[in-house]
C-alpha cells in the first residue's frame, strides 16, 4: 500500500504530541532510516519512507513506501500530506524538497539546520559566529581566492567541496598550498573550503537531542577511529578528561540551541594534544558513531529522533551497560563469500545489526557489531576480534 492511499486522513498540523499510531515519515531509506523505522514501530508508530533508491533498507521496515526522486516536488507534496510528521535521514535532501514538505506537515529538524549542515561554508560561518573553536579555514570558490587561502594556510591542509561530501568523498589532502590550484581543478572547481590539517590525537563525536520544548539530552562523548576516511570503530566512553567532556557538551548544546534543532544532531570534534577541541562538522541526524546507543544506552539515538519528532519527552542518555564499542561491517567483508556469522555470534557480548542491503560493495556500510565489556579497551578489542572472526579461515 502506498502512502497515497492514506490521503483521506487529514494531516495533523498542530505542534502537539503525536500519539503512537500516528504516521511518521522519513525522507531517505538507508540504514539510518531503517533504524529510525525500527524504533518508531517498537513505540507503536506507523512509518512511511520516501526513497529515491531501489535498494532501500529503510523501506523494508516501513508500512508505506513511495519511490520517487527527491526533486519530484509533486510526489513530495503528496507524501507530506499523508504523514503526521516528517524527518530526514541524510543531509543532502534538496532544500526545495524540505520546503515543499514543510507546507503540508511538521518537518523536524527544520530546513535551517539542514541548510547549515549541507554547506561547509555556512557551517564554518556558524561555528565562527558562535565563537566555537575551529582550525584555520579559508573559502576557495575560484582562482581569485587562491592567494589569500595560501597565505592563511601555507602548510599541509585538506581541500573539501562545500557541498555533497561524505565518507571522505570530495576531499583532497595537500602537502602545501602550491598544490591548491591543481587540487581545486580535480574537484571540478566547485566551491570549497581549505582546512589546515589538524594534528589531532583523537576524534570524538557528541550526539545530542533537543525536544520540542527545548529540553536537551546529550550522550557522553564517543571516540572514533576511521579507516580509509570511513568510520571504522567507535568506543564509549571516550578516554577524555572531565574538562574535555564538559567542553564537548558545551559545544553540542550551543549548536542545538542556536540552530533551534528539534531532533538529533551529532558534532564531530578533533581532540588536540593540549586538550583543546576543534569542531570538524555537524550531522543533522543520528550518526554512525551513535549506533552503539541501541545496545548500551537507556534510550537510543533513534528513539530520541522518534520522540523529538512526535513531540514526546526525550529519554535518558544514561549508559545502562558497561563500556561499549561498535565496529562497522563494510561490504569488503563479503569479498570471499558470506561472512561466518556463527563464529562472531559465538563470542560473548556481541550484538549484530545488519541493514538488509542486497548488494555488498566494497566500502558500503552493510551493518555493525556492538560489543559490551567491563572496559572501553576490552570492548574495542573484542569488537575488532568479532569482526575478524567473520572472515577468519577455519
Ligand atoms: N582538517 C582536517 N585535519 C585532519 N584530518 C581531517 C581534517 N578534515 C577531515 N579529516 C579526516 O577526514 C575524516 C572525514 O572528514 P569529514 O568529517 O570532514 O568528511 P565527511 O566526508 O563529511 O565524512 P563523514 O561523512 O564520514 O563524516 C575526518 O573524520 C578526519 O579523520
Ligand atoms: Mg565527518
Image: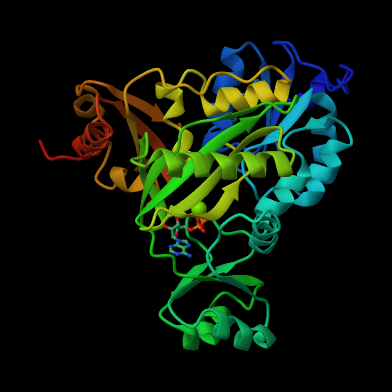
Of residues 238 and 85, the one drawn nearer to the viewer in this rendering: 238
Count how many numbered circles sit on residues in the image: 0
The x, y position of residue 253, in whole percent, is 62, 39
Which quarter of the picture shows residue 244? top left
Which residue is found at the position 84% from the left and 33% from the top? 78
Q: Quick one: which residue is furthest to the front in this view?
A: 243
Identify whether 187 is placed above or below 170.
below
The answer to whether residue 204 of the structure is visible from this angle is yes
The x, y position of residue 73, in whole percent, is 83, 45
Identify whether 268 is placed above or below 197.
above
Is the N terminus in the top left, top right, bottom left or bottom right quadrant?
A: top right
The x, y position of residue 308, in whole percent, is 68, 25
Identify whether 309 is placed above or below 234.
above
State the colouring used for the structure image.
rainbow
| Left or right of 288 in this view: 133 | right
The answer to whether residue 363 of the structure is visible from this angle is no
Which quarter of the picture shows residue 236? top left
Is the C terminus in the top left, top right, bottom left or bottom right quadrant?
A: top left
The x, y position of residue 287, in whole percent, is 52, 39
Which residue is found at the position 44% from the left and 83% from the top? 176
Which quarter of the picture shows residue 173? bottom left
Identify whether 388 is placed above or below 60.
below
| Left or right of 204 in this view: 165 | right
| Left or right of 88 in this view: 289 | left
Amino acid at each position: 500500500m502506498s502512502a497515497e492511499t492514506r490521503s483521506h486522513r487529514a494531516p495533523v498540523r498542530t505542534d502537539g504530541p503525536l500519539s503512537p499510531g500516528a504516521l511518521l515519515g522519513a525522507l531517505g531509506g538507508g540504514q539510518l532510516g531503517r533504524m529510525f523505522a525500527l524504533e518508531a514501530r517498537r513505540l507503536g508508530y506507523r512509518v512511511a519512507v520516501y526513497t529515491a533508491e531501489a535498494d532501500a533498507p529503510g523501506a523494508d521496515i516501513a508500512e508505506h513506501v513511495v519511490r520517487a526522486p527527491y526533486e519530484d516536488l509533486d510526489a513530495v507534496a503528496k507524501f507530506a500530506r499523508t504523514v503526521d510528521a516528517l524527518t530526514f535521514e541524510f543531509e543532502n535532501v534538496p532544500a526545495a524538497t524540505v520546503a515543499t514538505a514543510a507546507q503540508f506537515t511538521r518537518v523536524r529538524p527544520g530546513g535551517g539546520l539542514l541548510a547549515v549542515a549541507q554547506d561547509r561554508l555556512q557551517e564554518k560561518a556558524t561555528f565562527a559566529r558562535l565563537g566555537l573553536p575551529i582550525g584555520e579555514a579559508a573559502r576557495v570558490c575560484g582562482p581569485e581566492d587562491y592567494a589569500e587561502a595560501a597565505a592563511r594556510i601555507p602548510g599541509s591542509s585538506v581541500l573539501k567541496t562545500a557541498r555533497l561530501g561524505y565518507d571522505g568523498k570530495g576531499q583532497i589532502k595537500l602537502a602545501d598550498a602550491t598544490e591548491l590550484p591543481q587540487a581545486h581543478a580535480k574537484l571540478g572547481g566547485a566551491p570549497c573550503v581549505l582546512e589546515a590539517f589538524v594534528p589531532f590525537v583523537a576524534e570524538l563525536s557528541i550526539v545530542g537531542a533537543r525536544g520540542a520544548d527545548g529540553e536537551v539530552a546529550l550522550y557522553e562523548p564517543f571516540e572514533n577511529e576511521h579507516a580509509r576516511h570511513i568510520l571504522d570503530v567507535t568506543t564509549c566512553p571516550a578516554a577524555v578528561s572531565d574538562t574535555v567532556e564538559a567542553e564537548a557538551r558545551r559545544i553540542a548544546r550551543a549548536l542545538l540551541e542556536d540552530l533551534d534543532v528539534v531532533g538529533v544532531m551529532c558534532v564531530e570534534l578533533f581532540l588536540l594534544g593540549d586538550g583543546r577541541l576543534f569542531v570538524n562538522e555537524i550531522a543533522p541526524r543520528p550518526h554512525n558513531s551513535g549506533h552503539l546507543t541501541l545496545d548500551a544506552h537507556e534510550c537510543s539515538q533513534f528513539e530520541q529522533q522518534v520522540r523529538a519528532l512526535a513531540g514526546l519527552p526525550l529519554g535518558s542518555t544514561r549508559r545502562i551497560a558497561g563500556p561499549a564499542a561498535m565496529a562497522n561491517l563494510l561490504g569488503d567483508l563479503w569479498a570471499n563469500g558470506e561472512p561466518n556469522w556463527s563464529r562472531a555470534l559465538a563470542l560473548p557480548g556481541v550484538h549484530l545489526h545488519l541493514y538488509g542491503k542486497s548488494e555488498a560493495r566494497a566500502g558500503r556500510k552493510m551493518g555493525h557489531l556492538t560489543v559490551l565489556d567491563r572496559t572501553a579497551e576490552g570492548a574495542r578489542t573484542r569488537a575488532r576480534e568479532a569482526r575478524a572472526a567473520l572472515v577468519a579461515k577455519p
